[in-house]
Amino acid sequence: MASVTLRNVQKTYPGGFLAIKGIDFAVGDGQFCVLVGPSGCGKSTLLRMVAGLETITDGEIDIGGRIVNQIEPAERDIAMVFQNYALYPHMTVYDNMAYGLRNRRMAEPEIKTRVEEAARILELGAMLTRKPGQLSGGQRQRVAMGRAIVRQPKVFLFDEPLSNLDAKLRIAMRVEIRKLQRRLKTTSIYVTHDQLEAMTLADILVVMNGGQVEQIGNPLDIYQKPATTFVASFIGAPPMNLLPIKPDEFKSQSGGDLAVEAGILGVRPEDLVVSSEATSGIAFDLTVEAIERVGAETYIYGTRQRGAQSIAANPGETPPGEVIVRIPGAVAPDIGEKIRAVAPREKLHLFSADGRQRIGP
Amino acid sequence: MVEHRRFGNWLPHLILLTGVVIVAFPVYLAVIASTHDNAVIANGQMPLYPGTHGLETYWNTIVAGAGKTTRQPVGGMMLNSLIMALGIAAGKIAISIISAYAIVFFAFPFRMTAFWTIFITLMLPVEVRIFPTYKITSDLHMLDSYAGLILPLIASATATLLFRQFFMTIPKELVEASKIDGAGPIRFFFDTLLPLSVTNIAALFVILFIYGWNQYLWPLLITTRDDMQTIVIGIKKIIDVHDALTEWQVAMATAVLAMLPPVVVVVLMQRLFVKGLIETEK
């Protein structure tokens, strides 16, 4: 059990590429921290720096009150679960879990107790004598977790552990990882590019982009008050609608006080309602371009009938001028139909024109 | 491939059988010749059925040494060949697996230079560097010794390259997991890398054992004492006699005996050998 603190951590690769541009955050004892971001944002590099598999160019990493910059991975008291599991193919499940303990010269009876306990928790009891090649993806994933658990480390590190599983198993394992972490109360850092995984697992969510932290906080706070347009479009699916606005636009609908300056207006698809009534907020006149029915809800993709402008595209963002509306149920307008989507004022997000800053509400 | 051919499979079988006959007939001839009396062979009308002198010939060849021309028994030659072949195979595997380990898993200055230097030695087999190698071996007083037979032949670029290719398929995460599990470089080598390389080692062993067993030029150069002769050289010496009739039955028995150990190795290790060459799942 320990807290993990990063102070101005930087990583420069030989050749001068600055992969991590100074990161500060702290994960409290027993907390589950998720690093999320698009591929290439540096989240895995950062995790590997905590693990000791990458050198730290500048700054400090502190695990349980000890600066670990110069300490070998084996001595940092961490355990890591890899994306491809990295099980030893020639060892049985039991030996895979026991290997790290044997290297630490733990007594064999103690190893047996720990491995059997972990096998019980992960329901691997019947598979201890098998080799990884004889296991399914989900079972291998469990063995990888078991290898981490038996060590009883201060910190668990997860590097996209679920990305090799199929969609259904991924959801099941996600719940299991969360339950397990709650039960063991071990501080955890988890890397993923899946915003849904990030939202559901995290106590603290760290949204990263381009080697920098975009926003840190409670997942729901981040969802409700994204600090930048990047976070706004990355967290939430389908992504938030982001539209550039001019000072005089939307005045008729909002009573003249909505936009104080030029910027970017954001509104989540689920906050839009198809309605012809006037509202205190904003109204879009849309032409329906596409409909996606997923059963419980329906996504309407519409283009604005006027004033469609392009803005700087971030990954996962909707194309310029397109607005997504999420409505409950399966009853939707026809393609080509003209609709009006409205959102109340308190559901709107306003960002500065460069998208780097939230200016309201 | 499932096909229904009008004439069945007789044509492919015919071709294959022809191939088998072409390869096997000289071997059969050698076995037959080794069972006849020298006089029968010498008159040029050797029958194609087994003779009656087999046991006697093999006893004379292996244990007693050939009767008329006083000669070393082939048993000793076989032992020399075996020691040399095993030494070369084991030495080549040991050296190349270590160098491949260094080249693939460690970052050190001039790593690529080291790799290319090893690669270039592919162009320098013993035959090319035979004089300097002989000089060094002789300066080190290793003529007429097992060390002299084995050591100059064990540096192997081929095996190093093979291990390098295999090591490069091992996921980086496996190394990292070992690091986190507290295994240092030596432990990783013995606990993980070596067990994973078993099939590769077996495949290489088969190839290298036969390579070592079949060595001719090098042993011919550095062995002068009769008790250090290898069997491959023995065959040649048995055929090359002056002022006497070549004892063909002994020569043929020696040839058959020289064939046996490689055959045994291939048969015993066939399964591992094939697995080592085709296995891709890691």
Image: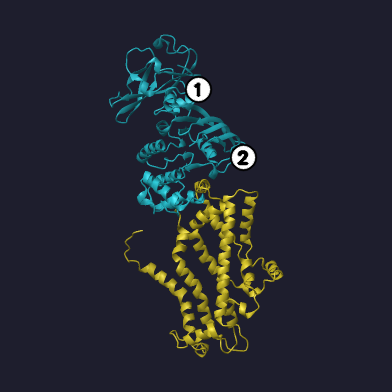
Chain colours: A cyan, B yellow
* Residue B248 visible here: no
**Residue A224 image-quadrant placement:** top left
**Chain of the residue that carries numbered disc 1 in the rendered image:** A
* Residue A110 visible here: yes
Are labels 1 and 2 assigned to the same chain?
A: yes
In the image, what residue type sits under mark 2? Pro
**Chain of the residue that carries numbered disc 2 in the rendered image:** A
Residue pictured at 57% horizontal, 72% vertical: B83
Furthest residue in direction top, as rendered: A256
Residue A156 falls left or right of residue B8: right
Please say if A210 is above or below B28: above
- x and y, in percent, of residue A96 in the image: 45, 50
Q: Which mark is residue A14?
A: 2
**Residue A182 image-quadrant placement:** top left
Q: Nearer the viewer, mark 1 or mark 2?
A: 2
Q: Residue A355 carries which label?
A: 1
Give neighbour class at mark 2: few <14, some 14-19, many 20+ (Cα, 10 Å): few
Q: Nearer the viewer, residue B53 or B109?
A: B109
